[in-house]
Image (tube, rainbow, N blue to C red):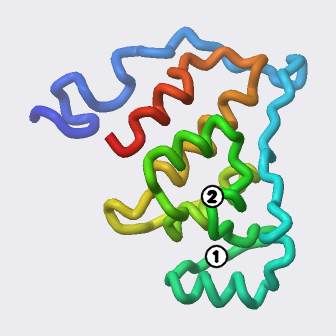
Amino acid sequence: GGGGYGGGGGFGGGGGGLGGSLQNIDFTSQQLIPFEKDFYIEHPDVTKRPDSEADAWRASKQIVVIGDGVPKPCLTFEEASMPEYVLSEVMKQGFDKPTPIQSQGWPMALKGKNMVGVSATGSGKTLAFLLPAMIHINAQVSLFIPFCPPETVLERVGT
């Protein structure tokens, strides 16, 4: 029969031998480039915010967090500790404050934490991961990763 996984049609299993000649890499004998993951600088207002207030805000937005070392949400763009080149472009678009998923997601992503964010369409999920992703990528100066300049992406925000 055609199509499906492993059922003919040339699409299932093996991929036509792609990668068949690749060899395992012994990473213990490799000198890897250091990879920075934590770019979050907690704003003084966030630091002063009591845990109980952060928990109450999360509850009011139906945000559930599980795990250790979960940062408090940033409730304003200024609290997000984004670089000026990011913050200025976001502010130009006329947004007044981060959406709930951005408020909690940005600190987590900037810290390099794993996160699963589930939110409605139009809630700001794309910027919740995209802006920290650009910061992470731009900071890895030793790595070659083809990516368009952050200013280009940010100019398209809201268009």
Question: In this orientation, which residue lies closer to the viewer: 90 or 139?
Answer: 90
- State the image quarter where residue 158 is shown: top left
The crowding category of the residue bearing disc 2, from other C-alpha atoms within 10 Å (few below 14, some 14 to 19, many at least 20), is some
Residue 31: x and y in percent read: 89, 18
Task: Residue at 18%, 29% (x, y): give it.
Answer: 8
Q: Mark 2 and mark 1: span between their CA atoms? A: 21 Å
Quadrant in which the N terminus is drawn: top left
Residue 68: x and y in percent read: 79, 71
Q: Is residue 20 left or right of residue 45?
A: left
Kindly state the secondary structure of the residue where label 2 is placed.
Answer: loop
Residue 108: x and y in percent read: 69, 59
| Marks 2 and 1, the one that precedes in the sequence | 1
The crowding category of the residue bearing disc 1, from other C-alpha atoms within 10 Å (few below 14, some 14 to 19, many at least 20), is some
Kindly state the secondary structure of the residue where label 1 is placed.
Answer: loop
Task: Residue at 39%, 35% (x, y): give it.
Answer: 156
Question: In this orientation, which residue lies closer to the viewer: 20 or 80?
Answer: 80
Task: Residue at 67%, 66% (x, y): give it.
Answer: 74
Type of amino acid under label 2:
Phe
Q: Is residue 77 left or right of residue 153?
A: right
Question: Which residue occupies the extreme top position in the image?
Answer: 21
User: Which residue is labeled 1 in the image?
Assistant: 65
Residue 38, above or below 63: above
User: Which residue is labeled 2 in the image?
Assistant: 77
Camera-side mark, 2 or 1: 2
Residue 95, above or below 3: below
